[in-house]
Amino acid sequence: MFAPLRLAMLPLLIALAPLPAAGETFRAMLGGRTLGTLDYAPGLLRTTLDNTPLGVGDGVFEGRSRAARTEAGQRVLHYTGESRAPGESRRISVVLDKGRVIDTVISPASERTALSDPGKVPQGVLDPVEAFGRMIGAGGCPAAFRIYDGRRVIQVTPKSAGTEGGRTTCAMAYDVIAGPGHLSPFRFKSLNLGLVYDGATLVEIAVSTGPFALRLVR
């Protein structure tokens, strides 16, 4: 049985995967305004927002997902997510074994939720970096999948698809099925997720709910 890891033990995870190479860049758009960029490479997801209205949403998120091995020799996947914004920061570490969460550490501890207890997380989840890679690599509308970010579980489910002029548009449902919603104080739990593929290449992601609509454009 794998013993739960604590912050002091995390250095005992030995990285097996190399650092990610250069990858894809998307512009984050709200209406006609560019808010920042999202960069993805296998094992790395970085969002930089530096042009939000009045700077209220500015900040940086960096997620890394790497194959690792415990000191006992167990092969695992180690996800880290770090958010930095003026006056606040949060670091999340999740260890997964074939889609099963075996450890979650969050700093500061006040950011923990009920779903930060690994025993409450369903099996078969992807970390956020894996999930983005799933959409990038699908080559078309992806099958349903679940995401775990250390604080909540999200179900992403296909609803419909259509192809025209070599472009495929996928309508997906994005539902927080356990844990808090996104973006305090709104706590959005259900969003519409639209994916556009030009051939096999993901070129646009649209996230919307009510009047809120964010586009990631390659």
Image: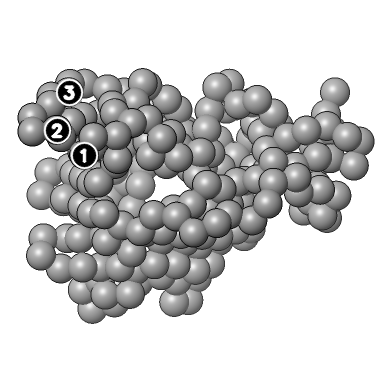
**Residue identified by numbered label 1:** 198
Numbered disc 2: secondary structure = loop
Identify the element where label 3 is drawn: strand
88 on left or right of 30: right
- Disc 1/disc 3 C-alpha distance (Å): 13 Å
Estimate the x, y position of residue 141 in percent, counting from the top left. Answer: 28, 26
The answer to which of 44 and 179 lies nearer the viewer is: 44
Q: What residue did someone put label 2 on?
A: 166
* In contact (CB < 8 Å): disc 1 and disc 2: yes
As rendered, which of 124 and 187 lies closer to the eye?
124
Query: Residue 7: x and y, percent?
Result: 77, 53
Residue 161's tag is 3
Figure check: 131 above or below 64: above
Q: Amino acid at mark 1?
A: Asp
Query: Label 2 amino acid?
Result: Gly
Q: Residue at x 78, y 33 (%)?
A: 75
Q: Position of 131 compared to 79: left or right?
A: left
Q: Could you tell me which quadrant the N terminus lies in?
A: top right
Q: Point out residue 53 in the picture as x, y percentages from the top left corner.
A: 21, 73
Q: Categorize mark 1 by other alpha carbons within 10 Å: few (<14), some (14-19), many (20+).
A: some
Is the residue 139 above or below the residue 33 in the image?
above
Write the residue at 37% across / 30% down. 138
